[in-house]
Amino acid sequence: KESYAAWLQYKKIDDAALLKEYQTWTENIVSLSDSIVIESAQNELSKALSSMLDIHPEVSSGLKPKNRIVLATMKEFNLLDNEIDIDFKQINEDGYMIKSVSTKGNKTIYLLGKRDAGVLYATFHLLRLMQNRESLKDVNIIESPKNQLRMINQWDNMDGSIERGYAGKSIFYKDHSFSEDFNRIQDYARLLSSVGINAIAINNVNVHEVETHLITASFLPKAAEVASIFRAYGIKTFLSINYASAIQLGDLETADPLDSKVKEWWKNKAKEIYRFIPDFGGFLVKADSEHRPGPFTYNRNHADGANMLAEALEPFNGLVIWRCFVYNCLQDWRDRSTDRARAAYDHFKPLDGKFHENVILQIKNGPMDFQVREAVSPLFGAMPQTNQMMEFQITQEYTGQQKHLCYLVPQWKEVLDFDTFANGESSPVKHVVDGSMFPYRYSGIAAVSNIGNDYNWSGHTLAQANLYGFGRLTWNPDLQAETITNEWIGQTFGQDELVNEHVSHMLLKSWEIYEQYTSPLGVGWMVNPGRHYGPNVDGYEYSVWGTYHFADRDGIGVDRTIKTGTGYTEQYFRENTKMYDSLETCPDELLLFFHHVPYKHKLKSGVTVIQHIYNTHFEGVQEAEELKERWAALKGRINSERYEDILNRLEEQVEHSKEWRDTINTYFYRKSGIADEQKRKIY
Ligand code: BDP
């Protein structure tokens, strides 16, 4: 099925001239290297060429054949006998070069990587060019990923459920054990490595009873099999661990990170794991957060906790990825100093320089929790002596749960481009997490996956674009959103211009549209507690989880300023503190994240806050309707399975956006008593 193949469609080339051209370039495959990763590259090529070009080239290791694709890493490059002049210094460890050379009677495409992973990435890039019908003449591509770790976090549980999953059940687990469908996992690995992903944590950060046993002999053999599938695609496997494993699995009475028995236990555990998975990536850890155990229980800090694990993994070059999503979800909401937005910075900033070299702090993009819009976490750039990486959420927990269209690449780009001023002007987040601003040993970008065992992986077929876009952006955060979008559409739906125009417009506008009919001006939430879907303005307002809009009859918004508020604005570098702290300079879209203002406060756009709420909610619904119409205009141009699927979701989105509009508008009309200037119907 088309939707299963996602962006690796490999549709038959129907333009006869182009077909001929491609066939000539690819008559033979010469592979100078030999490894499981190279084998994956060869298999992908064979599969794609037979389906796109109807040819079945033999793979050989001799250089003789003409009209060929040559696969080689730096190590075997000398075998080419100076056929071409190439400088491997131009690329980094995961980088690659693609060069096409045409002489009389012989055409060659070189796919060259420093290591075998690069050759695989080059292969996928070549196939992308062909899927997008580009000419293979004079190709000269030099690519290196900007980020070292390009990681996916699965939030899969072993009972087969997925925390915050909206696309069916887990492809990894079933009935408290590993799933037997390893083909599906392999297809997932292909999708991931085609966009350059090189690491994956295969279980939920909330590690329950069963998953705690993943690091024991009961499950390690299967985990090792899964790791070997990913290994063949250049992807390292990580596991999320339970901080209290030493108690639960080791019968110790404590999980105190400074206790020598606890240290010993983890050292032995690490040895055991590496016996099963020699290139195991390491641990992903959620500690002292949302009722998970952690070092706080023993009056130790998070550096103590992380370093104890880091020592155990050090001999094997393993990493500890320690999440900064740490806050007290049982706080007293009347005490403003407990502002949840402050938590990560307050906990971690004082520990800068105290972590081992193989610890990386994984920080959510915003200080709260993956809202449709929130400020960028002030922790980025604030710890020059501690490895940091980004955590995004591909799964649409707060952004419509893959029933609504919400393409997140534009949001991620904004975050990555945000200037932290950590090192003076032009210190964007992307230069923190790619390790170029401070001398980080490890860094990168991770994201929570949006896939499950639905036949189309992502529930909403257009949500595939978020997974694709995440990978591409992580490879190169400088890519334009439009470029990524067009690449994806071409590979997924082919070369129909109208399809391209409409789908690209739909995707690129969708985040803004979703924001319009949901929570306004950066205030966030207003969702049903627990499942986080659908409007409920006061859902979390008086809850201990600590997320508020503070709306009363006079005004709305959270005062996070220094003088009168929670003081959160002070966590930024001076320039940003100034910008956010002042009503005059705080950008409209984040106004209610930083300030509590009267409903009649005038925005920079010229309208009042209350009028803005009304306007955006009416407009948002209208634009959701336009999304549907744009899609409907493509009937007949897209195969009916995908067409109908997407249409159904868009229809549901339209209906649901009306519920949002009416709930929000009515609530604020009644609270404020201020009528809509345009006298539209508010219930
Ligand atoms: C929140 C989710 C919750 C996760 C938590 C986390 O609602 O299910 O466990 O984040 O990131 O977004 O740990």
Image: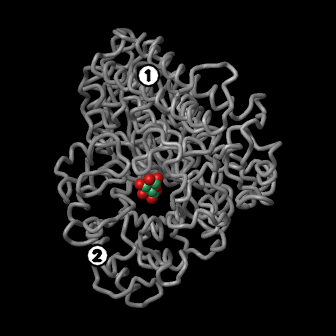
Q: Is residue 683 above or below residue 528?
A: above
Element carrying mark 1: helix
Kind of residue at badge 1: Gly
In the rendered image, residue 280, in percent from the top left (x then y), is placed at 35, 64
Element carrying mark 2: helix
Q: Is residue 96 above or below residue 465?
A: below
* Residue linked to disc 2: 272
Kind of residue at badge 2: Glu
Q: Is residue 452 left or right of residue 508?
A: left
Name the residue at 33% across, 18% down.
643
Q: Is residue 161 left or right of residue 483?
A: left
In the rendered image, residue 86, in percent from the top left (x then y), is placed at 54, 41
Near-viewer residue (78 or 97): 97
Q: Quadrant of the N terminus?
A: top left
The 10 Å Cα crowd at callout 2, few under 14, some 14 to 19, many 20 or more, is some
Near-viewer residue (655 or 506): 655
Of labels 2 and 1, earlier in sequence is: 2
For the question of whether residue 445 can be seen, the reply is no
In the rendered image, residue 552, in percent from the top left (x then y), is placed at 65, 46
Q: Is residue 376 above or below residue 316?
A: above
Alpha carbon distance from label 2 to label 1:
46 Å
Near-viewer residue (147 or 295): 295
* Residue linked to disc 1: 490
Q: Is residue 560 left or right of residue 90?
A: right
Q: Is residue 613 above or below residue 163?
A: above
